[in-house]
Image (cartoon, rainbow, N blue to C red):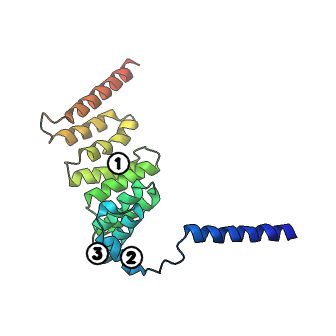
C-alpha cells in the first residue's frame, strides 16, 4: 500500500474513535443480559421498542415452551416489521405447539399471502379454511378460503362455500352486504360466460 493509503486509513481510524467518544457510551457499565431482560419485563408494554418487545416475547417463549401464544405474538410482531419469512417460522412454531390455534392459522395464512405477492394461493386457502372450520365466527378466513376457486373461474364452488360461511350470520349482519356483492359479481360473470 502507498503512503497516502496509510494516511487515509489512520485518519479514518482517528475519526471513528472521536465519533465513538462523542456518540458512544464508553463509560457505561456492562449490563448482564438477565438484568436487561428483567428491566424490560418490568416496563409497561407501550413503553417498549419493537426490539425490546421481541426480547420480552422471546423470554416468555423460553419460560413457556409448550404454549402457542408467545410464538404467535412473536409472529405478529415480526410480520408488522416486514420480516415475513421470520413471521412464517414463528407462526409454524405456534402451530407445532397447538395445531388448532386459530389466530396462528390465520397469521400463517396472511403471511403466506404476503410472501406470495398478495395472492391467496391453495396453501393459504387451506389454512384459512381450517381456521374457519375450527371457528366459524372467523368470517374473513371463510371468505378467503374460497378465493382460489373464485380466481380459477369455479364460481359455483366459491359461491357454495360463501353460502356456508354466511349461513350462521344474523340477517341484519352488515357482512351480508359483502356476500350479496359477491353473489352479484358471480352472477354477472356467469351471465357473461353464457352470452359468449
Q: x, y percentage for residue 6?
A: 81, 71
CA distance for labels 2 and 3: 19 Å
Q: Quadrant of the C terminus?
A: top left
The residue that label 2 is drawn on is: 36
Which picture quadrant has residue 35?
A: bottom left
Q: Secondary structure at mark 1?
A: helix
The residue that label 1 is drawn on is: 125
Q: Is residue 69 above or below residue 159?
A: below
Q: x, y percentage for residue 152?
A: 40, 37
Q: Is residue 118 above or below residue 42?
A: above
Q: x, y percentage for residue 5?
A: 82, 67
x 42%, y 64%: residue: 51
Which picture quadrant has residue 3?
A: bottom right
Asked whether the residues under the numbered discs 3 and 1 touch, taking CB atoms below 8 Å apart as contact, a structural biologist would say no
Mark 2 crowd level (few <14, some 14–19, many ≥20, 10 Å Cα): few
Residue farthest to the top, as pictured: 195
Q: Is residue 2 visible?
A: no
Q: Which mark is residue 64?
A: 3
Asked whether the residues under the numbered discs 1 and 2 touch, taking CB atoms below 8 Å apart as contact, a structural biologist would say no
Q: Earlier in the sequence, mark 1 or mark 2?
A: 2
x 25%, y 61%: residue: 100
Q: Is residue 126 visible?
A: yes
Q: Quadrant of the N terminus?
A: bottom right
Amino acid at each position: 500500500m502507498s503512503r497516502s493509503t496509510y494516511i487515509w486509513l489512520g485518519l479514518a481510524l482517528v475519526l471513528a474513535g472521536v465519533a465513538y467518544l462523542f456518540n458512544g457510551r464508553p463509560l457505561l457499565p456492562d449490563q448482564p443480559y438477565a438484568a436487561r431482560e428483567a428491566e424490560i419485563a418490568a416496563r409497561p408494554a407501550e413503553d417498549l421498542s419493537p426490539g425490546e418487545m421481541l426480547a420480552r416475547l422471546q423470554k416468555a417463549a423460553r419460560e413457556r415452551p409448550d404454549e402457542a401464544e408467545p410464538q404467535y405474538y412473536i409472529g405478529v410482531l415480526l410480520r408488522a416489521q416486514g420480516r415475513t419469512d421470520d413471521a412464517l417460522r414463528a407462526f409454524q412454531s405456534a402451530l407445532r405447539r397447538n395445531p388448532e390455534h386459530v389466530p396462528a392459522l390465520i397469521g400463517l395464512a396472511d403471511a403466506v399471502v404476503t410472501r406470495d405477492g398478495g395472492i391467496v394461493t391453495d396453501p393459504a386457502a387451506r389454512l384459512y379454511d381450517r381456521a374457519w372450520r375450527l371457528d366459524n365466527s372467523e368470517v374473513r378466513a371463510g371468505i378467503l378460503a374460497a378465493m382460489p376457486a373464485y380466481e380459477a373461474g369455479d364460481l359455483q364452488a366459491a359461491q357454495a362455500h360463501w353460502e356456508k360461511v354466511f349461513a350462521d350470520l344474523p340477517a341484519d349482519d352488515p357482512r351480508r352486504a359483502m356476500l350479496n356483492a359477491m353473489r352479484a359479481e358471480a352472477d354477472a360473470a356467469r351471465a357473461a360466460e353464457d352470452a359468449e
